[in-house]
Amino acid sequence: MVLFTSAIVVGALLLLGAALNALLAKSLYTQQSADAVQQVKQLTRQTELGDVTGFDTRQVQTKLQERLTSGQSGQLSFQAVVLYGADGTETFSNGNYRFRHVPAGLAERVTLRGELAYVYIRSPVDPGRMLVVGAPIRIDQSDVGPQQAYFFYPLNFQEETLAKLSNFLLIVGAGLLAAVVILAAISIGRVLKPIQRARDVAEEIAAGNLAARIPQATSQDDFGKLAESFNRMTDNLAQKIGELEHVGSLQARFVSDVSHELRTPLATVRMAADYIHAARAGLPPDAQRAAVLLERELERFENLLEDLLEISRFDAGVINLEPVEVDVSSLLDEVVDALDPIAHGRKVDVGLQVDRGQGQPLVAADPRRLDRVFSNLVKNAIEHTVEGGVRIWVGRRGGDVVVTVADDGEGIPAEDLPHIFERFYRADVHRARTLGGTGLGLAIALENVNLHRGSIDVQSEVGQGSTFTVTLPAIDPKPEPVGGQAVETQPEPAPVPEVAVGG
Amino acid sequence: MKGRVLVVDDDPSLGEMLGIVLRQEGFEPVFVRSGDQAIAAFHQAKPDLVLLDLMLPGKDGLEICRELRLESGVPIVMLTAKTDTVDVVLGLESGADDYITKPFSAKELVARIRARLRRRDTDGAETLRFHDIEMDVMAHQVTKDNKPVNLTPLEFELLATLARRPRQVFTREVLLEQVWGYRYAGDTRLVNVHVQRLRAKIEDDPENPRVVQTVRGVGYRIGPEGGAVESSAQAGDQG
């Protein structure tokens, strides 16, 4: 940026310098030639010679020479003068110059046209250039024939002046350039700094801090206005987001309230159903069956309510994860044990393979939530397996603990795969729901896995079964507590920092 | 087992149904529908256990809990529709011994009530001594520095369970089973909150407990007496 500006400035200075130089040179030389012509005219005017009546040729010639050389002492002085007669003889020469030094063109103009003329030449004798002014001289009252006088004016002064001027321009230019560069750097800094600050603030906002604002610039320039607009925009944005969040939290709150309000009547119904169910032996057969259905469906209803409440908590973002160290392999062991009656009832083999080759499968987690995730996956796998078994694998892969749950079920059609983690999505609406799933199981599993900063994935092909893969960030085992050092006075176990879910 | 149960609940249907279940199980239920009358009803009925709904018109469940605890160690089981962390913990901190979340089955309810009314058989005069504490298990009395300390039956049970096997570390799950009577996993917050309440009564400095110590990542135990760990700390703590 600074470089670019400097290049422009250097270019402009060079152009300006050259133009100034040319202009000055021209006016200097014009001035010089005009002055010289003036002087020559005056010196060669016949009347200046005075009365020469009665003078002989020699006397006239001498007087003329005196007259011409008198101009040499003036302010504008020529270095030499040459007199040249019409007869082709050099009648006078002073200084180092001779008639042969006069350019032919000039001599021709003076001789043939009889006019005053001048020309610039590179001096053949001295260094530098010279102005040569030629003028015809006619002395009427004498028998002295027409002559030409050539005056050699040195241009040293002009050239020196020009050289000085060039140097001066160069110095001024360099100074100007330096000043411009410094000023540019400063002003660019002044422009860029607020922009950088604005960028930092924008990034802060992008990172989620809606309270971030550009410090109010006092200036009323464009940047001040930009900062103002930017801040106003952020205000509006924050307000809109706040409103949306409010609506969202109201809705989540509503679901939560409904779930809570349902619980009291449900408690009565539950106890009543239990009571009738327990006393069903004395009822007529249809009433007995009704009691059984009531009891069973109530169970489903309660599960659904629990799941709804759970989902509403996720939606409201009120879940605080209080993670502890969990060995996923032993957790899976318990899950498999707990589901053994169901697996046994459906004659499905459930195999658990623990791979400790890359370390212990330890994670920082809420064991109850993880239990839910894996219970749900294993239960689903058992439910979907018509013939064959369920294979569970757990082990570490790099920084993760990976659990796969594979079944020999009918598989999930490709068009359903992207949706199975959606709420109430049923891959197969015709399938018997003998295990009483709520339709929220996988959605809750996904939320729970996300809560633990993990991921859940599914691979499936119709006829090939399905494989669910859960990946959770692994932790390294703590060193074993030794002796009395293990005793601490903190009442709560909190080996890993708390993680809160955003709304 | 005969026991009088005071049911504090504003929902008439739930109250009636609770009555049916309790009577069937051999308890003697007494009802009060408003929080404001709960304390008076308690004085009148002198129940063996209080079933207390947290959400009540008038005085709320937490307030009643605190007031009851000022004068009595009677077992209190909260009925709660809220399972969100804060509500349960607040209830427990107000002095409830246990809680049960609506909806619950008759079996669950009865199991919770029985667990709280159960008295452990003790083989004659059993006295536990540790630190500056003496527990007369038969008489359910505790002294610290020969001064009586008022523990609720649950707190007494918790301390006695730990003290019978000093220096053994009890996990929260084991304590839930032995003290609260949970056969399956219970809520470990029950243990955390009651350990804190117990410490407030028996520790010189509850913030820096010496009697009931936390073993991080495992559970609780009665700390060793006069060990190197304590002697230095005790010197500073006790003044």
Image (cartoon, coloured by chain):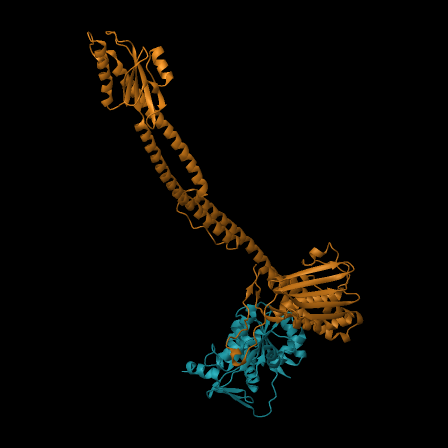
Chain colours: A orange, B cyan
Residue A477 is at least partly visible in this image:
yes
Viewer-closest of A415 and A439: A415
Q: Is residue B4 visible?
A: no
Q: Locate the C terminus of chain A and report the quarter of the image it occupies.
A: bottom right
A434 up-or-down from A64: above or below: below
The answer to which of B193 and A252 lies nearer the viewer is B193
Q: Looking at the rendering, which quadrant does residue A90 occupy?
A: top left
Count of labels in the image: 0
**Looking at the image, which residue sits at the far front?**
A89
Q: Residue furthest bottom?
A: B124
Q: Does residue A317 lie above or below A50 as drawn? A: below
User: Would residue A421 appear left or right of B218 to someone viewing this image?
Assistant: right
Whole-percent x and y of residue B239? 40, 82
Which of A28/A393 is in front? Answer: A28
Q: Position of residue B165 (x, y in %)?
A: 57, 86
Task: Give the percent coordinates (x, y) of residue A379.
Answer: 72, 67
Instruction: Measuring from the top left, give residue A226's x and y in whole percent.
Output: 46, 44
Q: In the image, what residue occupies the spot 34% across and 19% down?
A: A100
Q: Quadrant of residue A298?
A: bottom right
Q: Nearer the viewer, residue A7 or A217?
A: A7
